[in-house]
Image (cartoon, helix red, strand yellow):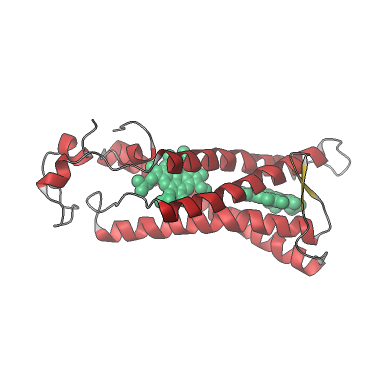
Amino acid sequence: MALYPFAELTEKKESYMSDAVTHADLQAPLARYSLLAQAFHWVSAALMFAVVPIAWYMTTLERTDPTREDWYSLHKSIGITILVLSVLRVIWRQLDAPPSLSGFMRPVEVAAVHVAHGLLYVLLFAMPISGYLISAAGGHPVVLFGLLPVPALVPVDHDLAKIGHTLHDLGQWALYGLVGLHVLGTGFHVFIRRDGLLGRMLPWRVG
Ligand code: HEM
Ligand code: HEM
């Protein structure tokens, strides 16, 4: 069984471990996200890494390009899938709380991670919802993977579509910044601190 990372890597309390961390904690098994929470994370992350380059590509296409419609439709379908997964993921998170980070890092770092994760969740909702507003309020249909029409929940309203557009446009920059920090932060734990943190989001031990 994988040991709590500090036990194997340091066998002593480090300065960033809280006073509440006992020797027994150091010997405890690594507390992981549940397999379902891990699946939500990695499937959503993979879809995020697909939906963004598709957006970059589709927005370069001429209006006359015969494939343009299909790329937009794929972008919208993947985006709505991310929204549905995020709803299920947040419900699951209420039923199955993530493992505590205390002992992994200083309280101020735990607070920063919670803020960053919170903002990532905001974007997991804000990006698809603002995208949906561009389409639905702009009078464009949203059909999931060419099969399932998504109802138009808002009237055609060009001001509303414009608001959606502004939010979607600005949101992408927040997304790039936060995901960049998130991945760099994970890299810091894997390569510098080597505390096994990535293993909390994987079925196996890392670092
Ligand atoms: C290569 C890419 C990625 C890596 C290596 C990665 C790694 C991780 C790790 C290790 C955690 C768990 C942190 C902990 O132990 O507390 C985590 C949590 C999280 N990640 Fe990522 N991640 C990646 C991509 C993404 C993307 C693209 C998003 C969304 C836009 C994302 C959103 C989140 C969120 C919201 C959490 C918090 C989960 C929760 O507490 O419910 N991640 N990630
Ligand atoms: C997590 C989900 C999503 C992400 C990360 C995302 C990201 C992006 C990005 C980066 C762009 C390019 C922006 C630009 O260059 O101006 C874009 C454009 C666009 N997205 Fe999304 N999107 C998501 C979901 C959606 C959804 C669900 C829809 C509609 C149902 C949608 C509709 C659009 C449309 C219509 C455009 C083109 C806007 C324009 O013509 O400038 N997106 N999206």
**Residue under the image location 24 percent in, 32 percent down:** 2
Tally of numbered discs: 0
Whether 51 is drawn above or below 124: the answer is above
**Residue under the image location 30 percent in, 32 percent down:** 205
Q: Is residue 60 visible?
A: no
Q: Is residue 28 visible?
A: yes
**Residue under the image location 50 percent in, 42 percent down:** 40
Q: Nearer the viewer, residue 105 or 156?
A: 156
Question: Which corner quadrant of the image does residue 199 belong to?
Answer: top left
Q: Where's the N terminus, which quadrant?
A: top left
Residue 107 x/y as whole percent: 26, 60
Residue 148 x/y as whole percent: 76, 43
Q: Nearer the viewer, residue 201 or 110?
A: 201
Residue 183 x/y as whole percent: 43, 43
Whether 43 is drawn above or below 106: the answer is above
**Residue at the far bottom in the pictured view:** 159
Q: Is residue 15 left or right of residue 189?
A: left
Quadrant in which ligand 1 is drawn = top left
Q: Where's the C terminus, which quadrant?
A: top left
**Residue at the far right in the pictured view:** 64
Question: Which corner quadrant of the image does residue 75 belong to?
Answer: top right
